[in-house]
Amino acid sequence: MQNPARIQAYDGMVASVGTMGARAIVTGAGAVIAAVVLGGATIALPGPAVAPSGEGTMPHARPAPTVHLPETVDGWSRRAPLRRIEAAGMFDYMDGAGELYLAYRFDHLDVAEYESPEQGEILVELYWMQTSDDAYGLLSGDWGGEPVALKETVPAAGPRALYGAGLLRLWSDDLYARVLATRESEAASRAVLAIGRAMVTGRRDPPPPRLATSLPQTAAELTLRPGSVCFLRSHLVLNSAYFVSQRDILGLGPSVEAVAARYGNARLVLVRYPDARAARLALESFRTAYLPETQAGASSLAKIEDGWAGFGLSGRGLAVVFEAPDRTATASLIAAAVQAIETLEASHE
Amino acid sequence: MSDRRVVTRRDFMRGTAGAAVGVSLGHLGWAGQAVREPRSASVILVRDQRALSASHDVDVPVLKQMLGETVTRVTGKATPREAWRSMVTAEDTVGLVATPHLNPTHEEVIAEVRAALVDAGIPADRIRLAQGGPEKAEACTALISLPALKAHWLTGIGTVLKNYIRYSGHPSRYHDENNDRLGEIWLLPHVKGKTRLVLVDALRPLCDKGPQPDPRYMWDYKGLIAGTDPVAVEAVCLKIITAKREAMRGEPWPLSPPPLCVQMADKRYGLGTCRMDEITINRFGWTEGVLI
């Protein structure tokens, strides 16, 4: 962490700094899409120009975020310049896996590799998202692993970094990162965590998406399962968390916020659309495809093949419940979820 | 694909997912295969506790033994050399179709298959790595499919059927809601009938869907799974993945999305059988943690 170097990038310019050279390329539109190639001990990496993320915010201009990657860590050395992968290159980089990141509001990916002659490699992937919510969403796809504190003062509201078997996953503002040691060992674990600490140092810790933290804790006899909340925007991610339909019958997309959560064996999908009309259209699409035995309206439920299912609509919010054990539990969970979203809306978040 | 009915969770609950998709595809010419004849298939599972070290390195001599046992069991021949010769000839151009992403096929597996083919009399210059676009398959007269065992976040399972996705020339057309069509790639003219062996690298599978490898969900299974019916081999792989997931969580942990492509490869495309009551699994070697 010596010799911190910050790259000043200007529209249309290429700047080079650092002992082995650094390069920042700026688009004509003024958005920094820099590829940084630094040989110094620390780099500052211009990223997407976006706003501090908050509940439902759309990206807008803000100072470029930075991340610090050490040159060496406990015998591992960074062996090559950062590689920049834009959205169009994600398929080549990771086959079908790229679709997960594109299912959120993805900006670009930077990849760094560390190597140690005796201890294998460490792969660092920095997924720059357009908002903090999107980065949180990527972490929320799997809350497994051991929560680790990468800062002395741990931000509230759940873990921000999870470690297991040589893999560290972290959410830091608009950054979602994976740091993976190819050979797990105590030394590799220390190095992975050191890289993680360096990355989050000095970065902001916005709260999780409000929709994700507004979920009811209980409804009737149902209790929210810890570690079951997944924030998403795409039906591909929803289907990965809980399969509903091959096609997008809930009208999800980049401008939509949704959470999937588990209450016992029941499932709740809570969606907030850009406006009430979009919510009504989505409900009709869902009802027609999935619950045609129900009547059109703001709320209904039915017993189907795998338990009770139902929905509740309020303004631009839609709550859908699956696999609930009985009518009472279904109605209670729908009501509690609708109440949660109405409270959220009333707070003008 | 706007002409297709929406397949929902409820179709799976009712057992009508296949019908929902298959019937509406009748105009594409697959309807004849919707009427299914009884089938049978044999799948070979060979495991050896010594196949991987504690640090997951492959023991090549052990792997070589496992490979020999696998191909002799698949073909019923007395020796590995005879087994390979029954599958390919010296006149063939043999393509080895390994998986490069997510949970890549071990290099040692590819190397040992190549060495065994050379030992069986296939000229080295007629053996090539054939993963890639359609031209890779077109250039070969015989294919040995060498995927590694893994789940996949878009298709549920991403082992056998998905291994040929690039042969379509349009991989993205088979992602998302269209993954049920993966089986049709095996019927493309430059692919159909060329696969002589499906050999799954199950040395260290990945039981969660990713989309990127997470070592928490990898385990040393130390196995090879093989057969000539790609759907049957995939169905056995699916059983192992599913059993491992349940064992890890201590409760049902179904793959999501469900692997519709496996059912469709059977019912719609007639590539083989996914019905476990039609599949004979022959197990050899290490039995601990066999999961099936």
Image (spheres, coloured by chain):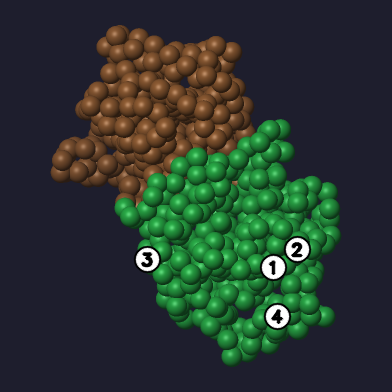
Q: Which secondary structure lies at badge 1? A: loop
Which comes before the other along the chain, label 4 or label 1?
Answer: 1
Q: Position of residue A29 (x, y in %)?
A: 15, 40
Query: Is residue A56 left or right of A241 when viewed as pictured?
Result: left
Indicate which label's residue lies in the foreground, 4 or 2: 2
Identity, as a three-letter code, of the amino acid under mark 2: Thr
Which comes before the other along the chain, label 3 or label 2?
Answer: 3
Query: Quick check: marks 2 and 1 in contact, CB under 8 Å?
Result: yes
Q: Position of residue A340 (x, y in %)?
A: 40, 13
Query: Is residue A294 left or right of B34 when viewed as pictured?
Result: left
* Mark 3 → mark 2, Cα distance in angstroms: 34 Å
Residue in view at x 41 percent, y 50 percent = B177
Is residue A132 depicted above or below B267 in this figure? above
Q: Which secondary structure lies at badge 2? A: strand
Identity, as a three-letter code, of the amino acid under mark 1: Ser
Residue under mark 4: which chain is it in? Answer: B
The disc label shown at residue B40, or none: 1
How many numbered marks, from 0 up? 4
Is residue A60 depicted above or below B111 in this figure? above
Palette colour of chain B: green
Which residue is label 2 attached to? B280
Which residue is label 4 attached to? B84
Which residue is label 3 attached to? B27
Indicate which label's residue lies in the foreground, 4 or 1: 1
Which comes before the other along the chain, label 3 or label 4?
Answer: 3
Q: Which chain is brown?
A: A
Which comes before the other along the chain, label 2 or label 1?
Answer: 1
Residue in view at x 39 percent, y 11 percent = A339
